[in-house]
Every structure is written in structure tokens, then in C-alpha cells.
């Protein structure tokens, strides 16, 4: 189901959101900071949550990456 949610976005936006989640998982945020709009969208989708001030990909977000 998570994968279908990203299908609702245009291709560029879906790719950007997937890469944002990959950057969070790989702990690359110092090298490639998240765009505020991408973070907000991922939070609204439930693919990311904030823990101790840092974004963490949720199980739904991980499922969308598969």
C-alpha cells in the first residue's frame, strides 16, 4: 500500500521522496540535508517520524522503499 501512495505523485516528486527516505536510512543528512517540503510530506504520509529531533523512517516508509 505504501508504494501506491508514492504513485499518486508525479515521477520527479516520487523519486525525490524515495531518495529522501534513503538518505535518512543511510544517515547522510549532514551531506545531503532534506528539503523542508520533502520532510513535511514524508511526515504527513507517515513514512517518517521525528525522534529526538531527527527523522526516522517508519515501517511504512521502509515498505515503500522495497
Image: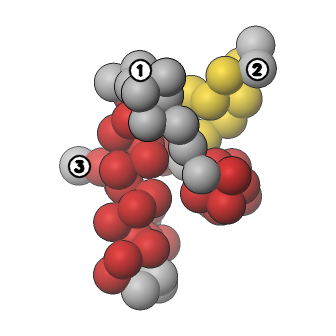
Query: Where's residue 56, x and y in %?
Result: 56, 28
Residue 4 seen in the figure: no
Instruction: Identify the secondary structure beneath mark 2.
Output: loop
Upstream in the sequence, badge 3 or badge 1? 1
Q: Which residue is mark 2?
A: 53
Residue behind mark 3:
66
Disc 3 to disc 1, how far (Cα)? 18 Å
Q: Residue furthest right?
A: 53
Q: Along the line of sight, which residue is nearer the eye, 42 or 36?
A: 36
Q: Residue at x 44, y 74 (%)?
A: 13
Is label 3 or label 1 in front? 1
Given contact means CB atoms under 8 Å apart, are the residues at marks 3 and 2 in contact?
no
Q: CA distance from mark 3 to mark 2?
A: 26 Å
**Mark 3 vs 2, N-terminal side:** 2
Location of the N terminus by quadrant is bottom left
Asked whether the viewer can see residue 9, the reply is: yes
Crowding near the residue tagged with mark 3, few <14, some 14–19, many ≥20 C-alpha atoms within 10 Å = few
In this figure, what is the number of numbered marks? 3
Residue 15, image x and y in percent? 33, 66
What colouring does the structure picture have?
secondary structure
Residue shown at 45% from the left, 59% from the top? 17
Which residue appears farthest toward the front when viewing the image? 31
Contact, CB < 8 Å: mark 3 with mark 1? Answer: no
Report which quarter residue 21 is drawn in.
top left
Residue receiving disc 1:
27
Q: Position of residue 29 (x, y in %)?
A: 48, 28
Amino acid at each position: 500500500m505504501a508504494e501506491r501512495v508514492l504513485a499518486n505523485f508525479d515521477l520527479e516528486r516520487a523519486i525525490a521522496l524515495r531518495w529522501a527516505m534513503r538518505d535518512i536510512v543511510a544517515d547522510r543528512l549532514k551531506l545531503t540535508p532534506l528539503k523542508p517540503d520533502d520532510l513535511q510530506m514524508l511526515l504527513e504520509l507517515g513514512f517518517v517520524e521525528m525522534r529526538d529531533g531527527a527523522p526516522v523512517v517508519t515501517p511504512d516508509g521502509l515498505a515503500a522503499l522495497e
